[in-house]
Image (cartoon, grey):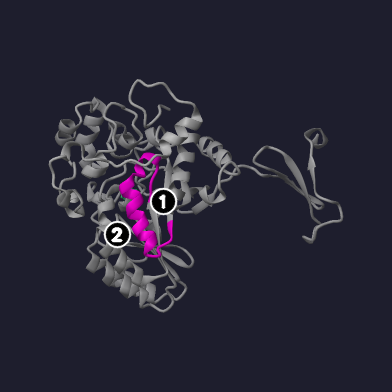
Amino acid sequence: MKDDNLPAGDKEPPSGHRLQLLKEFHSAGRGFWRDVSDADWNDWRWQLKNRITTPEQLRRLMPTLTPEEFAGAKLANTKLALAITPYFFNLIDPADENCPIRRQVIPRIEETRAAPWQMSDPCGEDSHSPVPGLVHRYPDRVLFLVTDRCAAYCRYCTRSRLVSNASGYDFHPEFDRQIDYIAQHPEIRDVLLSGGDPLLLSDDRLENLLGRLRAIPHVEFLRIGSRIPTFLPQRITPELCAMLKQFHPLFMSIHSNHPRELTTEVRDAVGRLADAGIPLGNQSVLLRHVNDDVTVMRALVQKLLMCRVKPYYLYQCDLISGSAHLRASVSKGLEIMEQLRGHTTGYAVPQYVIDAPGGGGKVPINPEYVLCRNAGRVLIRNYEGKIFEYPEAPDGTPTGTPPKEIVEPQLV
Ligand code: SF4
């Protein structure tokens, strides 16, 4: 993959150098909006009002738009709307057709091609929805969909059937019914607000919703899933953080896929959330020509830690309709995980998961470290490929044999 921070035409640097370049923090800058006042640029409502939403706007701002992208943008409003905040648009490299930021938010005509194995609801959420806007798939927790709108739209979105309402899903969450359902189910101890993006709600509406959920005695834990810290860091105002900190324990999962998304603006925004005592995790989706590269992924996870965010999940891309061009293979995901575990800080290593198609939930996918397990021992492999024996009796107590490293010929 081309280096992502080098000027076009520069030679690929050695991987250590490339890693360092990817880990540098830069501002997104002002780009085409250099004449806009600071007050407007830093106002999240101005950013939303001035999003790029039409193919014509996109082509005017980016004359290098390819025919595939222009055709994709023209059809986007029949599937998943086109919207990009000016802030995030500035991260796109217009000279690079395979720019990892561009691939995430600019539609392509390939999105209209659906393979037979692709689905509109790959995680089976609709079939686990007892009331509109609530998904109760796991025993002790629920997904509470707050809105169908986002600050910008990810072209691989698992919920593209409903977000942006481009395909006529007609999503209508009913907060009263959602909250009543939770109140009537004492087994629900964890509520995840998602959507669409919950941080698009005004502070007052969000405060009201969080307050009603917090008032339910058996709800121990609240979570917010949001892409806004990376699409629209201006939204993370001191007022928002002061409001959120009333509802602890409150965690937040942010969403970033490439180290270039972690700008100085994002670092400051998530720093404000961390200062408000909100534990932060990051969810990434493994995407072809975006982050299916060990150096890119290593830079992303290390940079996240520098932002005080724990890499939480790396998702295998769901089998969403029209996403084949963005899908990387499971073997590529395993190869990347193999190069993270042991090779970098344990806190930096996310859990790679496949959301089992059809509603089976998240299944952890790991490289094989347990080579064999029998009545007397467990054979394990470390990150360097060295093999060790952990002696263990059938009842789980260690045997008298001292643990040892095994050289490969003995295994034959
Ligand atoms: S922000 Fe989340 S919900 Fe919105 S389009 Fe992206 S992945 Fe989908």
Q: Dot 2 lies on which element?
A: helix
Residue that appears at 36% across and 38% down: 323
- Which percent across, then down, holds residue 232? 27, 50
Q: Nearer the viewer, residue 301 or 105?
A: 301
From the image, state whether disc 2 or disc 1 is nearer to you.
Answer: 1
Residue that appears at 48% across and 68% down: 140
* Residue 307: assigned label: 1
* Residue 250: assigned label: none
Q: Is residue 242 above or below residue 408?
A: below
Ligand 1 lies under 8 Å from the Cβ of mark 2: no
Q: Residue 356, can we see it? A: no
Q: How many marks?
A: 2
Q: Quadrant of the C terminus?
A: top right
Q: Which residues are magenta?
A: 255-280
- Which percent across, then down, holds residue 132? 31, 63
Verify whether residue 273 appears in magenta: yes
Q: Amino acid at mark 1?
A: Cys
